[in-house]
Image (cartoon, grey):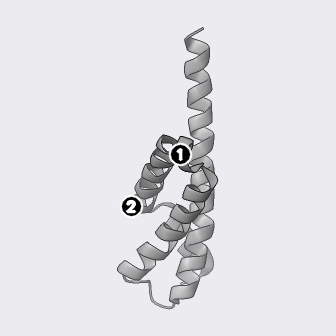
Amino acid sequence: MPLTELVMSQITDLFRIGLLVALVVTAYNTAANVGLAVPLALGAVFVAVLIPVTMQAPEGVTLTMAILTGLAVNVVIIAIILAARTVLMRALASANK
């Protein structure tokens, strides 16, 4: 499986996206106690390792390659989720004025 196909299959994985949305929500709920950066980073690594280890990797993809590309994809997805949250919070704040 070429690298582009691996990245596209990971970036469109609804299970991965759902886990990362839950991660961001949880990280913001606990940000006052533990901060935001460390839980997001550790959660991204956890999801990047969890999915390839528990699910069968496509043929021709090593576990290391699946984890490393998963980590990169997780960072991109988390950035998109954080951007969407920022836009939503600003829209809600301006609507309440």
Q: Residue at x 60, y 74 (%)?
A: 69
Reply above or below: 66 against 91. below
Of labels 2 and 1, the one closer to you: 1
Residue 34 drawn at (x, y percent): 55, 50
Q: Residues within 10 Å of mark 1 (few under 14, many from 20)?
A: few
| Among the two numbered marks 2 and 1 on one chain, the one whose residue lies closer to the N terminus | 2
**Does residue 1 show up?**
yes
Residue type at the position of mark 2: Phe
Mark carried by residue 33: 1
Task: Give the quadrant of the C terminus.
Answer: top right
Q: Residue at x 62, y 25 (%)?
A: 90
Mark carried by residue 49: none
**Does residue 61 show up?**
no
**SS for tag 1?**
helix
Residue 92 drawn at (x, y percent): 55, 20
Q: Residues within 10 Å of mark 2 (few under 14, many from 20)?
A: few
Residue 56 drawn at (x, y percent): 37, 83
Question: What separation in Å lies between label 2 and label 1 (alpha carbons)?
Answer: 27 Å
Disc 2: which residue: 15
Q: Residue at x 56, y 62 (%)?
A: 74
Residue type at the position of mark 1: Asn
Residue 5 drawn at (x, y percent): 55, 74
Query: Viewer-proximal residue, 67 or 23?
Result: 23
Reply above or below: 5 against 37. below
Query: Viewer-proximal residue, 1 or 20?
Result: 20
**SS for tag 2?**
helix
Query: Viewer-proximal residue, 44 or 39?
Result: 39
Reply above or below: 8 against 81. below
